Amino acid sequence: MKNDKNYFHRFVGYQIYPKSFRDSNGDGVGDVLGIIEKLPYLKKLGVDFLWLNPIYKSPQIDGGYDISDYFAIDEMFGNLDELKRLFKEAHKLNFKIIMDLVVNHTSDQHPWFLASKKSKDNPYRNFYLWEDATANQMPNDWISFFGGSTWTFDKTTNQAYFHVFAKEQPDLNWKNPELRAEIYKMIRWWLELGLDGFRLDAISHIQKKSWDFKIKSWRANGPWQPFMNVTGIEDYMKELKDIFNEYGALTVGEASGVLSSDAPNWTDENGYIDMIFELEQNVRRPDGSGDIYKFKQALIRWQKAQLERGWNALYLDNHDQPRSIDIFGDGSEISGKALAVAYMLLRGTPFIYQGQEIGMTNFPFESFTQLRTIENIRHYKDLLKDLPETEALKNVTINARDHARTPMQWDKTENSGFSKNMPWMEVNPNYETINVVENTSIFKLYQWLIKLRHDEFSISDGLIKFYFEKHRTAFVYERNDFLILTNLGKTKANLKFDFKIEGKNYQQILGSKKCELSSKMTLEGWEYQVFKKISQEENGNETN
Ligand code: GLC
């Protein structure tokens, strides 16, 4: 690989949710050997690096984001030797591998927390955030992301501990230099082992406001203001950055609360990380459908904000969202394709979430027993107090991240070729038609888009300019000599450029139908087109 520090501009990432990717030993749970088995598939797709969702030892309260041992692989996924083999095999094929760095919190079963709980003077007490409280009176009224107070009372010491996620995920105390030293040791250990970098989980929450901060309802970030990118976080991020730089680690941050205007400070040449996932694009209407106009506006805002400095991480699906093909698309393959073209050619590094490349869809939940994420099961049970079962289920599943976590659909054999035995989560019943073997058309489109990013500097590193920004569904932009037009809606879009376009100066290089570029275009529902400017030479016109 060339030794340029912006190599990731040409890269495309692939996100693997290991539990549901490929089960090699028939216990119903995906595993590390399963990932090794499928490396050739990923090579064929053409991606450059893989992000593995957490496979560390964990009680699995939050899909592995509750880690009880940072140095061990959970038995259900395999062991460390197998993981080292994965690193080796992946590197042979020129893949980089990154894993989640979950350091805002640990599991409540982590030995640090078990020790911390014991007494106020335990040496690990200060690894977490404890404050005086009573069973009925918490230190403040802050609310956690998963609902309820950010505090849980513990009667052993008559204090409460702080958690921005579930109560089984106590937050670490980043103010404590001893804690930070332990975390940095762990990061180095992984990079020494051969890991190429990290996806920094929930990293914008590691710094909190002082406990007496009052939430102001009119401010951005609603009830979560007290732990969203709070001043002081820079010091910790700089320390992290120094380690990443030392190893040349590839880093992407999940940093909700970092505003687009601040993002370049996180990701430019002097920033803490290579790129950032924004969460503002996930705008939903009350019925659960995506608001494509707001989605588009969020993307445009972030693209513009990081044009001169900084770098975006681009995505449609991930393990926390229902499938985009159903949310922003209408479930049809063509809508999945239009969305793919719309985001894959933006400025930034695109991530493809497993199954997205074959058009995997949401799961038709019929019973709460099919849910697997704890916060949704808890929410469902809560709702049952006021709602009938069907209503409660609808309410919970409309936005459930369970949709994205069903087993990968490899083929039409039993259990979709994911496992020989009953999978830990039900396979989507549409696996007989939507799978890697049958559904090659959207896969080929992804292959093509990835290749274009690799081959064309204009797409990997070029500038971006938007047209028809205020149009409800048309998403149109220029990347130097490329013009990309998509209609992210069912109804036709009539477009009129306010300058003259000579169709013959452009070559159609991709399209959902054949057509020539002109100043006036009508795009069908879910139509996509990519045009490339023909160089003057090729056009036989060398005079101007
Ligand atoms: C991130 C992860 C999510 C997890 C949370 C807590 O948002 O993407 O899956 O629940 O962090 O670790």
Image (cartoon, rainbow, N blue to C red):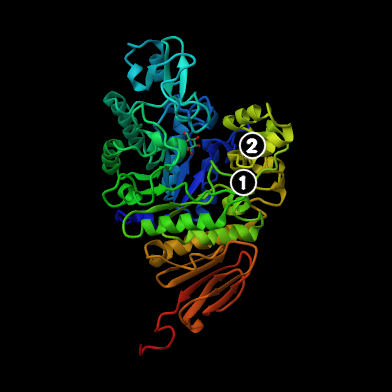
Residue 472: % across, % down: 56, 63
Where residue 529 sits in the image (x, y, percent)?
55, 70
Residue nearer the viewer, 111 or 362: 362
Rendered image: mark on residue 59: none
Where disc 2 sits, the SS reads helix
Q: Is residue 312 above or below residue 103?
A: below
**Residue at far bottom of view:** 543
Q: What's the mark number on residue 396? A: 2
Q: Looking at the picture, tell me which residue is in the foreground, 342 or 246.
A: 342
- Quarter in which the C terminus is drawn: bottom left
For label 1, the SS is loop
Name the residue rendered at 55%, 45% in the picture.
38
At a point 50% along the width and 73% down the height, the residue shown is: 531
Q: Which residue is mark 1?
A: 286
Q: Is residue 345 left or right of residue 30?
A: left
Q: How many marks?
A: 2
Which quadrant does the N terminus fall into? Answer: bottom left
**Of the pair 446 and 413, the residue shown nearer to us:** 446
Badge 1: how crowded within 10 Å, few (<14), some, or many (20+)?
few
**Mark 1 to mark 2 CA distance (whole Å):** 12 Å
Q: Residue 241 vs residue 524: left or right? A: left
Residue 255: % across, % down: 40, 42
Label 2 crowding class (10 Å Cα cut-off): few <14, some 14-19, many 20+? many
Instruction: State the image coordinates of residue 405 (x, y, percent, origin top left).
Output: 59, 40
Horizontal arrangement in the rendering, residue 118 relative to residue 268 (left or right): right
- Asked if residue 406 shows in the view, the reply is yes
Residue type, label 1: Pro
Q: Quadrant of residue 515?
A: bottom right
**On the picture, is 177 further left or further right than 255?**
left
